[in-house]
C-alpha cells in the first residue's frame, strides 16, 4: 500500500492517540479486553483505508471522520470510566436486598444497600433506606451524617439548593463545592454531568467549519486536517484540566 505523506497528518497522530487512550480505557475498566481490541482494530483499519483512497474527496472525508472519532476518545473514557464501579454497586445492592428480604430488621443491610444506591445516583431510594436504618436502631452518628449528605445529594440532583453538611451554608444546585467552606458534594455520575459534555465543543467548533471550508475549496485539505486536529487537541486539553487525575 502506498503511503501518502499528507495522509500521515491523519494516521500518525490517530494511531499514537489510540495507543495512548485505548490501553488506559482498558486499565480503567472502561473497556473490556475484546472492546479494546476491537477499537484498536477499527482505528488501524480506518487508517489503512484512508491511505488507500487518499487523494480523492472520500479519502479527505474519512480523514475528518477519523480525527473526530479520535478526538472523542477522552470524552468516551470519561463517560465509561464508572461502568465497572456501577456494575459492582448493582451486585452489592442485589445482595443486600436479598438479606433484607430474609431479615427485615437487619439494620446493617439497610445501610449497605443505601450506600450502593447512593453510588448509583439513586438518592431518593438511598434516603429512604437510611431512614429505615435509623428507625431500627440507636442513633448512629455515621448513619445520621450519611443520611444528611444523601439528602443534600438528592436535592442537588433534583435541581434544588443544597445545604452543606459541614458549615450549613446554602448552595445553588449547579455548584459542587460549598461556597463558604469548600466541602465537596460527591454527586454520583459526575463524569456524565453537563460540564463534561462541553469537552467536545472545541472539536465541533473546528471540525464543522473546517470541513465546510474544505468542501468549498476555500482551504487546502492539509489546512482542513490541521484545523480538525486543533479541535481534537482542545478536547484533550479540556479533560486534562477538568479531571487531571484521570488523564495521567
Image: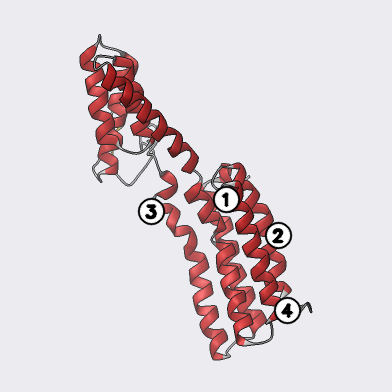
Local secondary structure at mark 2: helix
Q: Which mark is residue 240?
A: 1
Left or right, 42 with respect to 137, comes to right
Outermost residue, bottom side: 217
Q: Quadrant of residue 113?
A: top left
In the picture of the structure, the residue carrying the numbered disc 3 is 194
Mark 1 or mark 2, whichever is nearer to me: 2
Q: Position of residue 207 (x, y in %)?
A: 53, 73
- Name the residue at 28% across, 21% down: 100
Local secondary structure at mark 3: helix
Q: Quadrant of the C terminus?
A: top right
The answer to whether residue 166 of the structure is visible from this angle is: no
Question: Quick one: label 3 or label 2, which is nearer the N terminus?
Answer: 2
In the picture of the structure, the residue carrying the numbered disc 4 is 6
Q: Quadrant of residue 102?
A: top left
- Name the residue at 49% across, 48% down: 80
Q: Quadrant of residue 8?
A: bottom right
Q: Quadrant of the N terminus?
A: bottom right
Spatial CA span between label 1 and label 4: 29 Å
Q: Relative to 58, say whether 121 is above or below.
A: above
Spatial CA span between label 4 and label 3: 37 Å
Question: Quick one: label 4 or label 2, which is nearer the N terminus?
Answer: 4
Q: Position of residue 13 (x, y in %)?
A: 69, 65
Amino acid at each position: 500500500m502506498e503511503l501518502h505523506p499528507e495522509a500521515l497528518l491523519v494516521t500518525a497522530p490517530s494511531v499514537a492517540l489510540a495507543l495512548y487512550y485505548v490501553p488506559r480505557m482498558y486499565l480503567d475498566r472502561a473497556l473490556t479486553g475484546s472492546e479494546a481490541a476491537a477499537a484498536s482494530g477499527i482505528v488501524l483499519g480506518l487508517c489503512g483505508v484512508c491511505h488507500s483512497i487518499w487523494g480523492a474527496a472520500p479519502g479527505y472525508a474519512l480523514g475528518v471522520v477519523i480525527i473526530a472519532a479520535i478526538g472523542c476518545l477522552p470524552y468516551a473514557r470519561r463517560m465509561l470510566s464508572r461502568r465497572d464501579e456501577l456494575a459492582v454497586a448493582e451486585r452489592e445492592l442485589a445482595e443486600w436486598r436479598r438479606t433484607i428480604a430474609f431479615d427485615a430488621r437487619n439494620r446493617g443491610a439497610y445501610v449497605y444497600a443505601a450506600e450502593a444506591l447512593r453510588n448509583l445516583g439513586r438518592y431518593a431510594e438511598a434516603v429512604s433506606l437510611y431512614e429505615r436504618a435509623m428507625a431500627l436502631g440507636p442513633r448512629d452518628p455515621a448513619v445520621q451524617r450519611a443520611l444528611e449528605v444523601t439528602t443534600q445529594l438528592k436535592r442537588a440532583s433534583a435541581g434544588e439548593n443544597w445545604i452543606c453538611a459541614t458549615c450549613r451554608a446554602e448552595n445553588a444546585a449547579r455548584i459542587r463545592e460549598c461556597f463558604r467552606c469548600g466541602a465537596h458534594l460527591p454527586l454520583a455520575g459526575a463524569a456524565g454531568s453537563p460540564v463534561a459534555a462541553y469537552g467536545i465543543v472545541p472539536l465541533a467548533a473546528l471540525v464543522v467549519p473546517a470541513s465546510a471550508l474544505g468542501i468549498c475549496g476555500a482551504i487546502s485539505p492539509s489546512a482542513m486536517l490541521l484545523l480538525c486536529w486543533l479541535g481534537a487537541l482542545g478536547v484533550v486539553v479540556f479533560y486534562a484540566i477538568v479531571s487531571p487525575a484521570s488523564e495521567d
